[in-house]
């Protein structure tokens, strides 16, 4: 499959596509992401001592309160910082080059968000026997809604900036095959969403869902030439799963409702995965049709050769 919009999207990455730069850049991102919370932890110790720090760690592991969930999402600013530093220091380009043309970025973001939310709303019409209960009082939920949306915009933007921006661009500048620029970042994206330890080995089936999303987001990015479609898709998905209806045992701190799914039950787990996968595929297909139906790529379109340094 040829992606006419992909070549201009990755053009800035072609100047310095060497793999050693990408590896060092990825390490830099991980270091920044890991070290970013340290000033906060130091301040907590200074004010409340080590016991306060232990309490903070417990809340960050559970992620079942509004404050803890907001904090976890806001810490993704460290990923933004690390990715921006990586492209500047190792590839000599600005972070803006990771996003694609800005007018297209925001137009596609809004369209993809609207389509995804519409499909999610339609999916609610499908009968389900999964019990759903109130998680937060509506007044408390409304109080945190705007800050939750802002935090989700940051968190999803940070992940798209790294996985569909930095990694996809640099790998596509070096390799033509989607096995490199789509599959590899999607695999890393999936591994970065580990299941709760209490689910045991079968819990790792859950990483198939972010892996599928990663592949579809990579396709949308290549087909549209910006992060807008993937970012809007990601943002809407997390709005539904983190702010509207969470799943018991997952991140539920900001969710208005919680679906009581026993993820230790293999049948329930597979049912949840099948439903989520079908919805994800339907959203991808709708977004792709809406944003690329007028874009036609000739079968013999020329491909710019990968550079090397």
Image (cartoon, rainbow, N blue to C red):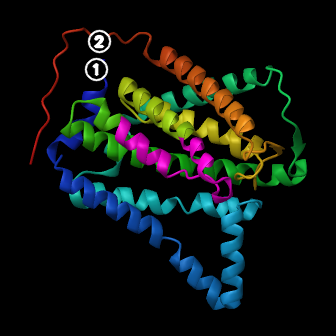
**Residue located 77% across and 61% down the image:** 65
**Residue located 66% across and 74% down the image:** 57
**Residue located 74% across and 20% down the image:** 122
- 195 lies left or right of 160: right
> On the image, numbered disc 1 is attached to which residue?
4
Range drawn in magenta: 183-207
Per the model, the C-alpha gap separating discs 1 and 2 is 6 Å
Q: How many marks?
A: 2
Q: Quadrant of residue 302?
A: top left
Determine contact: label 1, label 2, CB under 8 Å: yes
Name above or below for residue 129 compared with residue 285.
below
Compare residues 224 and 60 and report the one nearer the observer: 60
The reply to whether residue 202 is visible in this rendering is yes
The answer to whether residue 217 is magenta is no
> On the image, numbered disc 2 is attached to which residue?
297
Look at the numbered disc 2 and give the secondary structure of its residue. loop
Farthest residue in the left direction?
309
User: Main structural element of the magenta stretch: helix, strand or loop?
Assistant: helix
- 289 lies left or right of 184: right
Q: Position of residue 58 (x, y in %)?
A: 70, 72
Compare residues 269 and 14 and report the one nearer the observer: 269
Q: Position of residue 185 (x, y in %)?
A: 38, 43
């Amino acid at each position: 499959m040829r992606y006419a919009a992909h070549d201009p999207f990755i053009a800035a990455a072609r100047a310095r596509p060497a793999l050693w730069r990408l590896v060092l850049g990825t390490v830099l991102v991980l270091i920044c992401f890991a070290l970013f919370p340290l000033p906060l932890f130091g301040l907590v110790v200074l004010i409340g001592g080590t016991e306060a720090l232990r309490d903070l760690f417990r809340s960050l592991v559970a992620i079942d309160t509004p404050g803890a969930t907001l904090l976890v999402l806001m810490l993704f600013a460290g990923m933004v910082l690390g990715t921006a530093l990586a492209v500047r220091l190792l590839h000599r380009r600005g972070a803006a080059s990771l996003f694609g043309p800005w007018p297209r970025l925001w137009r596609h973001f809004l369209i993809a968000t609207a389509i995804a939310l519409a499909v999610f709303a339609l999916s609610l019409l499908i009968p389900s026997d999964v019990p759903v209960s109130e998680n937060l009082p509506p007044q408390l939920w409304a109080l945190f809604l705007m800050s939750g949306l802002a935090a989700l915009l940051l968190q999803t933007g940070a992940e798209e900036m790294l996985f569909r921006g930095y990694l996809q661009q640099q790998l596509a500048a070096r390799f033509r095959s989607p096995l490199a620029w789509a599959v590899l970042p999607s695999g890393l994206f999936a591994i970065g969403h580990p299941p709760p330890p209490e689910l045991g080995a079968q819990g790792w089936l859950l990483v198939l869902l972010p892996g599928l999303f990663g592949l579809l987001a990579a396709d949308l990015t290549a087909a549209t030439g910006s992060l807008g479609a993937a970012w809007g898709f990601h943002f809407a998905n997390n709005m539904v799963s983190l702010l509207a209806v969470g799943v018991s045992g997952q991140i539920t701190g900001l969710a208005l409702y919680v679906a009581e799914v026993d993820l230790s039950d293999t049948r329930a787990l597979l049912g949840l995965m099948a439903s989520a996968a079908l919805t994800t595929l339907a959203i991808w297909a709708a977004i792709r049709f809406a944003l690329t139906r007028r874009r036609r790529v000739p079968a013999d379109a020329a491909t710019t050769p990968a550079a090397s340094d």
